[in-house]
Image (cartoon, rainbow, N blue to C red):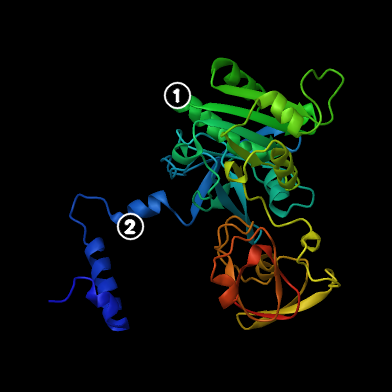
Amino acid sequence: MKHPLAPLFDGHDDVQAEIDRRHASTAAHPPGTADPRRLIDAHHPKRLSLTVAAVVIDTPTTRTFRLVRPDGGDLPPFLAGQYVGVFADGTNRPYAISSSPARLSHWDLTVRRVPGGRISNHLIDAVAAGDTLTTTGPTGTFHHNPLFHGDDIVFLAGGSGVAPAMSMIREIVDRGLDRRFHLLYGSRSADDVLFHEELDALAADHPGLRVDHVVAEPDPGWAGPTGFLTSGLIKALAGPLDGRMVYVCGPQALYPYALTQLAELGHPRRRIRFEANGAPTDPTAQPHWPAGTDPAAEVTVTARGRAFRTRRDRPLLDALEDEGIRPEAACRSGECSLCRVRVLKGQVHTAEEARLRLSDEKFGYTHSCVAYPITDVDLDV
């Protein structure tokens, strides 16, 4: 007698027959029970069409968009710290959910205007209550896992990087979690601080929460810490880090800076978690950018039977989208691998941010969101 899984190894036809059989058995669920495929789609949807229930003006440069289902039902669950992709203008961008995962009647997305930003400016300038936005389901690895990360957390946030911290804090409050959470939140000015009043009120009411605001350019009346999140300031405010997990989220410049400051404190890299946050501002600054290669020069990209020109310092994903070729994408930071493409011919610069698989280099794959064409390239997309 054959092993029950033998058909999976006998050949393509048998494999397909087994897949069809299992699919049919899943589809023919007993009457009165939930369809497993619908349960999966409900929890891990590929796309959602959501209504903007409200737009909150947080600061002159920041808005929070409250998204709800048109039918009023609950949204898919998520882990505090995760993000969703928002689609607009032929592309998408990831935004962290700032609301609590204990409240699934809505998702709050907090968006700060980025100078020249394609989607942030569109959302802030053009989207109003009653409009519809298309999003992905929740995704991302930047979330708290008490089994591995412990219950004593330090979070270094800069600017709108406080959004995932806000979700974590709101979950602690909503669920009454026995967790210590210390937020060190750096802002340019007092007017730029997001959730200022709510953060201070929550910290005052919950002994496990502590919030320290640090302002780089303080007004004369500012009484709190000033400057940047230096190693000395982190130590003065948070005390010994010991084995505590440190989260870091904010503008790209914060990551190498925070890593340097934490290293000065002797904090191990394995106890630091960074949120992926976009393609590098200047890929030519990375040490493996080919010497003497002009980033402004154009090369030819060939994909799906068409050829077009693009600058070397433009991410392949952006260039493909502009041509109407839209690979699936989520993080746009080299992490999730959804935008993975194969380079059939030519040379690309893959940024340090890319979390490639061990086999990718061998077989010519790269993450197009953080890959830059150095020569003319042919792609399998």
Pointer 1 residue: 176
Relative image position of residue 366 (x, y in whole percent): 61, 69
Residue under the point 53% across and 71% down: 359
Residue 272 drawn above or below residue 89: above
Figure quadrant of residue 127 = top right
Does residue 381 appear in this view? no
Comes first in the chain, label 2 or label 1 = 2
Mark 2 = which residue?
Answer: 37
Outermost left residue: 1
**Mark 2 neighbour class, 10 Å CA radius: few under 14, some 14 to 19, many 20 or more:** few
Q: Residue 374, relative to residue 174: is it above or below?
A: below
Type of amino acid at the residue the image marks with label 2: Arg
Q: Position of residue 62 (x, y in %)?
A: 71, 38
Residue 113 location in percent, x, y? 74, 44
Q: Nearer the viewer, residue 354 or 231?
A: 231
Which of discs 2 and 1 lies nearer the camera? The answer is: 1
Q: Quadrant of residue 376?
A: bottom right
**Residue 334 visible in the current orientation:** yes
Element assignment for label 2: helix
Please tell me whether mark 1 sits on a helix, a strand or a loop.
Answer: loop
Label 1 neighbourhood size at 10 Å, few (<14), some (14-19), many (20+)? few
Residue drawn at 87 percent across, 20 percent down: 220
